[in-house]
Amino acid sequence: MAMTDIATNDRKTLRRSYNLSVKPYLPMYAGVPTEREMTFDAEVEIGAKTNERVDEIELNMLNLEIIKESCAVTVKNKAIKIRNISVIAVYQKVVFSLEEFIEEHEELKIKISYTGAITEDKFGFYEILYTDKNGLKKTGATTQFEQVHARRMVPCFDEPSFKATWSVTVIHPEGSTALSNGIEVGSDREDMLLYRDDLYKMGDRHNTELIIAHELAHQADYFLPSSLEEALVADDMQSTHPLNWKAEKPDELMEGVSRISYSKGASLLAMIAAIIGADDFYKAVKIGFPLVTVRSVNGSTFEITQERYRKNPSLPDPPKYNTSRRGFKWDVPLWYQINHEPVTLTWLHVKGGSLYISADTANTTIVVNADRYGFYRQNYDVVGWKKIGQQLLKNHTVYSRRTRNAIISDAFAAALVGRIDYKTVLDLIRYLKDETEYIPWSAAFTGFEELRKHIGNAPQVKNFN
């Protein structure tokens, strides 16, 4: 049988339902032998339907011991003899080889009896410690199945795309408690949303503020720039990875649960929604993002170029992502704003090289990535940054709050890699004394924090907070 480390389960068998019975042996249970403590017995009956003719059933399983003589496969109440049960630990698989074929579209049941350990590693079925209402320390057990850890507790089709219904029975002594997730029974508690000085502690006020801020953050104008900021910071590091990458081992799946997946993913969806270019866009998804630079040429033209933005350009990318076929040029949707005019969309194409925009550059202020839908950073020549700063001081509301967020964030980013000096950045943000919106200030605070990391220990700035 040919497999890879994270081979997709045999799709010849469609998932339907699980009926799981589990009996844990915790230390406080009376009559539990020492050698059985922190273990469990279990039996699962899987209901499935074949998608084609099969004589093997392949499930995910990890660190469980099957009681082979108690396993059975039936079709329409007819027992199908199991020729062999093969545990392939390196691929986290168990394969049931049958004496005869099961025909296409047949309903079948797979009954498996097995034992396992209640572990300490926070995956699958694992141990927890807690203090009860009387102050006594006790041991319990709980589960963590996401992303692919159900296989540590039960042999199953353990892939996120495989959906099924579950019926779970927990056998436990009288006086102990078994809890499970269930249907939704309520929403935010009112006492978590309201605060009274005469009833609650200061810490409760902090929690209330966090909850309210979290709900407000779901408003797109606030959420998207914040998410974009997190993504840009994460994607300029050597630990970055593409959004579309293949995990070669189960352990690598957790690498995909990162700020790249969540924040960059959300940012790209926003950009796609703005320009409806999904098909072409998927071709361009790769690690990194462009730095778009605008320069004045001969007083009559703006030249716009791109290159990859990197915080540490001398360090190599991870070898498996550093291939010449990927390249580091993009077809960039370029939203730009000239003076007080509305935002305009054009394209900076890979094949075309530089983009040229005719204008009286001495009397024109240009801002690219206006409204910050593009997943890239902006940079300008010295005069370009100076004119943007002057406009912000004169009337910052010419630019939307998303545009102001982008200007501040990208100015700090340009300074961080030496494209401009920090005096240019500090001149640019002098207008903040008149700024009343949150997201421009958020970008500024992020920039200040990055600056503090670099100079915060210097004697001259020991009181800098």
Image (cartoon, grey):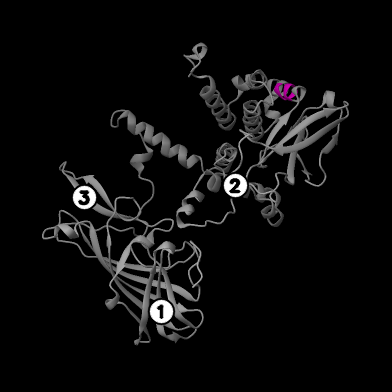
Picture quadrant of residue 392: top right
- Residue displayed at 62% across by 46% down: 287
Rendered location of residue 384, percent (x, y): 76, 25
Task: Tell me which label, 3 or 2, sits earlier in the chain.
Answer: 3
Picture quadrant of residue 429: top right
**What is the CA distance from the residue labelled 3 to the residue labelled 2?**
44 Å
Task: Tell me which label, 3 or 1, sits earlier in the chain.
Answer: 1
Mark drawn on residue 319: 2
Mark drawn on residue 380: none
Q: Which stretch appears magenta?
A: 385-389
Residue identifier under label 1: 97
**Closest to the observer, 110 or 179:** 110
Q: Residues within 10 Å of mark 2 (few under 14, many from 20)?
A: few
Q: Nearer the viewer, mark 3 or mark 1?
A: 1
- Residue displayed at 57% across by 39% down: 238
Does residue 376 appear in this view?
yes
| Three-letter amino acid code at the position of disc 2 | Pro
Q: Main secondary structure of the magenta part?
A: helix
Residue identifier under label 3: 139
Task: Tell me which label, 2 or 1, sits earlier in the chain.
Answer: 1
Q: Does 54 appear above or below 374?
A: below
**What is the CA distance from the residue labelled 3 to the residue labelled 1?**
39 Å
| Three-letter amino acid code at the position of disc 1 | Ser
**What is the CA distance from the residue labelled 2 to the residue labelled 1?**
39 Å
Q: Nearer the viewer, mark 3 or mark 2?
A: 2
- Residue displayed at 62% across by 50% down: 269
